Image: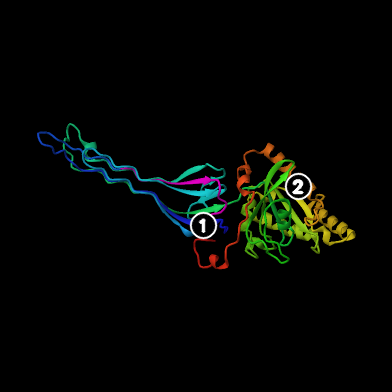
Amino acid sequence: MKFLDQCKVYIRSGDGGGGSVSFRREKFIEFGGPDGGDGGRGGDVWIEAVNGLNTLIDYRYQQHFRAQTGVHGMGRNRHGAKGDSVTLKVPAGTQVFEEDGETLICDLTEVGQKYRIAKGGNGGFGNSYFKSSTNQAPDWANPGQEGEEKTIWLRLKLIADAGLVGLPNAGKSTFLATCTRARPKIANYPFTTLHPNLGVATVNGKEYILADIPGLIEGAHEGIGLGDRFLGHVERTRVLLHLISAQEENAGKAYKTVRAELDAYGAGLEDKHEIVVLSQVDTIDADELKKKKASLKRACGQTPFVLSAVTGSGMQDVLRELAGVIETSKAEDPTLPKADSAISFNRKLKMQPMDDEDWEDDDNVE
């Protein structure tokens, strides 16, 4: 499945049906009078968060959605039917923005949430509506009101309990593959991960969703490397797991580089609880490990965990710490979006990157 987290969509609600101008004409009926019916209301455009989706890829192939026009009124006081509405189905965690990309319309954080983003036009009144004692034969009717049309941006922010951040090749994907059933691409070169990956880790009988995003480098907030757009997928997490590779020449500097990018991005990431981990410790000796652990401790102000996802050393300690922080956060702030409802679907989640040609020359994708 290809992964797409942002797209532009054109929507238009239905126009209202026009009212009818009609007079009753029947044999042996001396005074018929007006009997034009009202027009039906135009269909609405709704957006709904549903289970079973984890990407906006459906909106790459269809970007125009129009609700049905209301049926016009008819004689014999027959009112027109309402036009059919259109519902855009999106994964939980999707935000809807106006065309400027900044004005938030709605934020669908839970499965089942639904929002009307374009209201259908009202149907027009038929001439029977206007009859009165002083105007017994009106010969006019109202046209239906026009529907709303707009261009909107859909932006997906994955809902997870914990987010993995760090420089490229810090061991994030290896950590995710070791403690979950996710199978991200793992290789010994920078930017192996080109798209977010989700996995479900089980700790003490409870399941937690982990989100792995592409690595950050110095200047990512200015667009260097893959940029920092993918940080949006860890905005909703309760804790950040910051991995620093033991192969880095200066572990403290590596930590500060990523922290600077988090601070530059903002959106609350700079204030999130952070667990610092020195990873890939199986690649260095004990003396080197002691030096790099001390350097990292001076930089982050806390004693870092050490682990090796390949050998499994230190994995359980980190997972237990993650679980403890997540549970404490849930107790203190239950208002954050819940990732529990996505666990059953994401247990076997494996998202594939888009082909290079799919990203080129397409104003619908950023």
Q: Which residues are magenta?
A: 40-56
- Quarter of the rendering occupied by the N terminus: bottom right
Q: Is residue 279 left or right of residue 112?
A: right
Tell me where residue 324 appears, x and y as whole percent.
74, 41
Q: Nearer the viewer, residue 335 or 160?
A: 160
What x and y, as percent, mark residue 262?
68, 55
- Which secondary structure lies at badge 1? strand
**What residue lies at 88% left-to-right and 57% top-to-bottom?**
290
Q: Nearer the viewer, mark 1 or mark 2?
A: 2
- Locate residue 263: give its quadrant: bottom right
Say what secondary structure mark 2 lies in.
Answer: helix
The answer to which of 31 and 229 lies nearer the viewer is: 31
Residue 193 appears left or right of 122: right
The image position of residue 166, as x and y in percent, is: 72, 57
Disc 1 from disc 2: Cα separation? 35 Å
- In the rendered view of the protein, which quadrant contains the C terminus? bottom right
- Ranked by sequence position, the earlier of labels 1 and 2 is 1
Estimate the x, y position of residue 186 in percent, counting from the top left: 70, 62
**Residue under label 2:** 319
Q: Which residue is mark 1?
A: 7
Determine if the magenta segment contains residue 351: no
